[in-house]
Amino acid sequence: MTDILNAIVALSNFVLIPGAAYGAQLALGALGVTLIYGILRFSNFAHGDTMAFGTMATILVTWGLQSMGVSFGFLPTALIALPVGIAITGLLLLGTDRAVYRFYRKQKAAPVVLVIVSIGVMFVMNGLVRFIIGVGDVNFADGARFVINARQFREMTGLDEGLAIRSTTLITLITAAIAVALLFWFLNKTRTGKSMRAFSDNEDLALLSGINPERVVAVTWLIIAALATTAGVLYGLDKSFKAFTYFQLLLPIFAAAIVGGLGNPLGAIAGGFVIAFSEVLVTYAWKKVLEYLLPENLEPSSLVQLLSTDYKFAVSFAILIIVLLFKPTGLFKGQSV
Amino acid sequence: MAEPHLIGEAMTGGYGRGADILQGCTLSVDKGQIAVIVGPNGAGKSTAMKAVFGMLNLRSGSVRIGGEDITHLSPQDRVAKGMAFVPQTSNIFPSMTVEENLEMGAFLRRDDIRPTIEQVYDLFPILRDKRRQAAGELSGGQRQQVAVGRALMTQPSVLMLDEPTAGVSPIVMDELFDRIIEVARAGITILMVEQNARQALEIADKGYVLVQGCNAYTGTGAELMADDEVRRTFLGG
């Protein structure tokens, strides 16, 4: 019995809890991608770097607050800086739209043209972030590190395995839940949110109904700024901030959005968790859990790790390909690519 | 006699820089009456209606509503002038509920839209039952009802329908025509393009037969139905 409990605790500690946090971060990222696809009608390759920019802006404000001696108790100071980071990112995105995307929108450019334009925007944002904050690792998490650490847990329960819940994990889950709830409330209950869905559903009819497309686009970019910055800051708090890592996040985020069904917000959330858990499950060394569960003579001698963590992106790729082959519109009904 | 409520006079024009599809075509409808445009494929029926709604540039001719010249207004501005248009296809917001579709129809209105929604539900009772359902999940006939309902939400004085009965069963078609008559009785001017020419002319106060972008025959629905030439050529005997 204790063996089973130990196995469950080990599994939660190394797979379920980190997977849930990572899934929430991917879900927020994928929501941004899916909203851009649904409303602005292109796949935004600059999304990873938008997240990097938002996180960078938040880090800079955090440093400013810290130097003034402001802190948020056991919560990270970055949470106070987050709204400012979102505002700065919102300005950048509105500026980018005004300077770049609007030109192509007026020409009614094909989606593939916009995709390539967004790759250009990606390189510019990428350079901007590296120029301002550098290419190195930045750790900006402060406040309490653990809600409960492994030793406390072992003492509390008397089990061999410890369960550590890091405060950033909990913050990630709570913040993501609030962000998602706000987004769905906005899209389903407010007049502006409904007009965005109408615009996504049927652009021509939305125009006939008197919905102002420029306003819809502007509001969409602001929401993207909020989602991307929040996702980036949560990821950075949980791990650390590095410009290159954020660029790499693009793949799992796109995989999540496509797996869930592009253009479908619910799908993006589901997709985020599917990708996150697959990645963690496949790259986890199962030896420990199996040792608790299997009789002694069946215990594995190897690590029972299906794939080295270096290959974790292969998991997103594989899932992406499977979904595109067998269910191109994603798990939830989205638009096919 | 007073000028008709809606008139598109001597309209000539086509899409973009292409050839003229309409060659001096004239359409007019009195207030609360139903005008139907029929004609062979490629006669410019839908084009004529789109011209009235401002979706293509007229090289010459004019469009007036209630005596006001609106020839140079965009479709959006014409909506504000009391025109409503139900396109033939993609005329609903499929992922939104029936009620949200109606709300979006009234997007420009800032006053209380509840009474208008109730009127639409009274006109199409089935929509009241389905108001929480995504419009894209409804049957073809019900979708058309949503589309007409959405257009009525602006409380228009003119309702334009582009083949409202395309792809629906004969029973549903009859029912839709009944509803359209009801809308006209409420004082709304109706201009519609129809493939089912015979049935449409039966309910029409005025019929236009277009051939190659010109008015070929004009008359009351009954007159056109009685005209041997029209019957033989366009109504299949």
Image (cartoon, coloured by chain):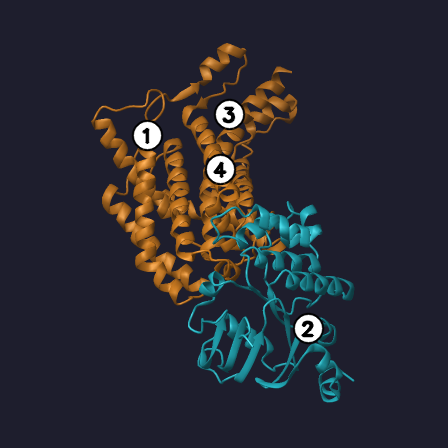
Chain coloured orange in this rendering = A
Q: Which residue is mark 4?
A: A180
Q: Chain of mark 2?
A: B
- A14 displayed left or right of B168: left
What is the three-letter code of the residue carrying label 3? Asn
Q: Which residue is mark 2?
A: B204
Chain coloured cyan in this rendering = B
Of mark 3 and mark 1, the one earlier in the sequence is 3
Same subunit: marks 2 and 1:
no
Give the farthest residue toward the front.
B1
Q: Nearer the viewer, mark 2 or mark 4?
A: 2
Same subunit: marks 3 and 4:
yes
Separation (CA) of disc 3 from disc 2: 74 Å
Q: Are marks 3 and 2 in contact (CB under 8 Å)?
A: no
Residue A5 percent coordinates (x, y): 60, 19
Q: Which residue is mark 1?
A: A80
What is the three-letter code of the residue carrying label 4? Val
Of mark 1 and mark 4, the one earlier in the sequence is 1
Separation (CA) of disc 2 from disc 1: 67 Å
- A223 displayed left or right of A23: left
Quarter the N terminus of chain A occupies: top right
Same subunit: marks 3 and 2:
no
Q: Nearer the viewer, mark 3 or mark 4?
A: 4
Relative to B87, residue A11 above or below: above
